[in-house]
Image (cartoon, grey):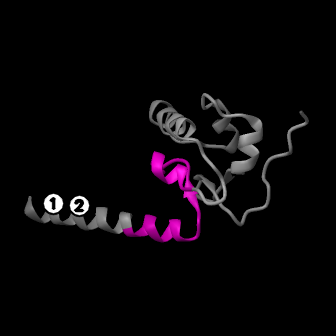
Amino acid sequence: MKKLIITLCLAAMCMVFAGTAFAQDGIVSFNTASVEDLMAIEDIDVPEELAKAIVDYRKANGAFKSAEDMLKVPGMTQDFMEELNPQVTEDGDVVFDPDAEPALAPSKC
C-alpha cells in the first residue's frame, strides 16, 4: 500500500512538472487550465467571468473536443473566440498557442 501511494505521488509530481514545462511556451490547455491560468493568457484580457464559465462548462460537459465546442460556453462570442484562436493538438487537446496561425475563419459581422 505504501509503495502504491509513493508511486501515485511521483506520478502526480511528474504531471505537475510536465504541465509547467508545457505552459512555459505560452501554451494553455482549455481542457485543464484553472481560472487563474486562463486569466493569465499573455496578450489577451480574459475576463474572470468568462474564465470561470470555461472551467464550469468543462466540468459539466467534459473536455473540449474541437475549437467550435468553446462557442457553447455561456458568454463566449465569435469575436472573442477568434482572439483566443483555439487550436486542436495532435493528441486532441484544445489549446491556446500564441504562435499559432489563425484557425477559425473571421466572423462576417
Residue 28 picture location, percent across and down: 56, 57
Query: Residue sitting at 52 percent across and 32 percent down?
Result: 57
Query: Residue sitting at 76 percent across and 46 percent down?
Result: 82
Residue 60 picture location, percent across and down: 46, 30
Q: Which mark is residue 5?
A: 1
Q: Is residue 42 magenta?
A: no
Cα–Cα gap, marks 2 and 1: 5 Å
Residue 14 in the image: above or below residue 70: below
Residue 102, picture quadrant: bottom right
Quarter of the N terminus within the rendering? bottom left
Instruction: Using the image as rendered, state which of residue 89 and residue 77 is in the foreground.
Output: 77
Residue 22 in the image: above or below residue 54: below
Query: Residue sitting at 54 percent across and 35 percent down?
Result: 49
Q: Is residue 102 left or right of residue 89?
A: right
Residue type, mark 2 in image: Leu
Q: Label 2, secondary structure: give it.
A: helix
Residue 72 in the image: above or below residue 44: above
Residue 47 picture location, percent across and down: 58, 41
Q: Is residue 81 left or right of residue 8?
A: right
Residue 109, picture quadrant: top right
Q: Which mark is residue 8?
A: 2
The stretch of residues the image draws in magenta is: 17-40
